[in-house]
Amino acid sequence: MGVLDFFKRALPLSDNDQYCLELLEGDEDCNQVRRIIKDKKAKFLLQKFNISILQDGDYFQLISELPELNELLIKINLNLKLLGQKEIFSRFSDNAFYTIRKIISSNVAGMGQAKSAVALQLFSKEDLHILIFGENTSKRELINNTAYLSPISAVSQASSAMSDNILFHANGGICAIHELLVMHRLDKSDFYDAMSQGYLIKDKMRYDTKAKILATSTPSGGLARTLEGIRRQLPESKIMNKFHLIFLAKSASAAQKIGIKNEDRDFIKEYINYANQIEVLLSKDFEEHLKQFALALKKKEHYFFTDVDDNLLTALVLLAKASARSRLSTTVSVLDIERAKEIVFEGLKTN
């Protein structure tokens, strides 16, 4: 060690340096970071998240002009940013559902319960499939907006979905498909198999296809005005049996568009990705409550535009867990149960 290096290391650390090193305490690279800080080969700089959907926050990043430190910087900076994110994520959690619902609804009129359901679909770890059926043309924007906020997503027209291998590109995220049920008969069969199995064999190659499907369908001649008419319009396809939720998209007046900054979109993607690592517990009491609720809906099935089946109970459970996850909670609460019940019950109505 040279004399200059000795004096560099002898200098006291700044408050920022000391704070960041304390944050990294226990990290296997902490001692190496301490050395390069003392040697003035790198420094900590405060960064802003630059978001506008809630009060902005900050975090530190380790900066250096030495290329040989790049690998270390990437690793350390991911950890430092996550530490900063945890604090701001906690502040965002109480309003995450409402904020995200508002953003994906920015240019979408009507379809209130569908908006809530697709907002929660972003927070479902399990496959939760949703179909929006009707004449409201803004249903296209709704599924596009949802895919736009998903950490992993792919969007396609039904006519090219299978040739583009869209389920593979959306694996682990949301697959948004416009006018799903006009898909070619052979493609429908392959699509159904891919949804059922979680993979697709194509040109002797296996492609993982575990994606949450968010699709639209428009009835010929517009949506019927009666319960019986809508029931007759619902397509007879085995693919329909794979959807947990079907929402009606009735005509509605235009909505006012709300803009979103790239930084806000990136923040939401990171929040969703963080939330989806949480395992949520549904108590036995709540599970039984949802079963009884589904049975009660079954008895009133003739009042709804579609049948009440096992998919609906699955949807209730997945929505409740997703609601808890959107709050960064490991347990389902009464709020989550009531939110799931409202989405399902109101979504079954034709009015």
Image (spheres, rainbow, N blue to C red):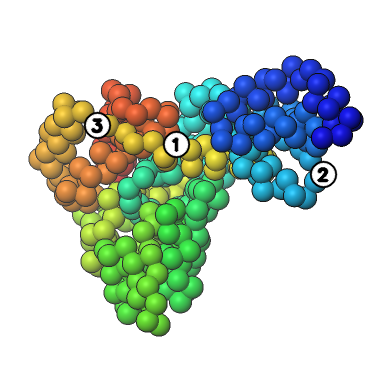
Mark identifier at residue 65:
2
Which image quadrant is residue 313 in?
top left
Q: How many marks?
A: 3
Q: Amino acid at mark 2?
A: Glu
Residue 132 in the image: state x and y as whole percent: 38, 53
Question: Marks 3 and 1, how far apart in space?
Answer: 16 Å
Q: In the rendered image, which residue does mark 3 sit on?
A: 282
Which element carries disc 2, helix, strand or loop?
A: loop
Residue 225 in the image: state x and y as whole percent: 31, 52
The residue drawn where x is 51% and y is 24% is 90
Please tell me whether mark 3 or mark 2 is closer to you in this view: 2
Image marks 3 and 2: residues in contact by CB distance under 8 Å: no
- Disc on the earlier residue, 1 or 2: 2
Classify the position of the C terminus by image quarter: top left
Q: Amino acid at mark 1?
A: Ala
Q: Residue furthest right?
A: 4
Please tell me whether mark 1 or mark 2 is closer to you in this view: 2
Residue 301 in the image: state x and y as whole percent: 15, 44
The residue drawn where x is 52% and y is 48% is 151
Q: Amino acid at mark 3?
A: Leu
Instruction: Judge from the rendering whether residue 194 lies leftward or rightward of residue 310; answer left or right.
Output: right
Image marks 3 and 1: residues in contact by CB distance under 8 Å: no
Instruction: Judge from the rendering whether residue 95 lies leftward or rightward of residue 341; answer left or right.
Output: right
- Disc on the earlier residue, 3 or 2: 2
Q: In the rendered image, which residue does mark 1 sit on?
A: 275
Q: Compared with residue 238, is residue 91 higher up or lower down, i.e. above or below?
A: above
Instruction: Judge from the rendering whether residue 119 lies leftward or rightward of residue 196; answer left or right.
Output: right
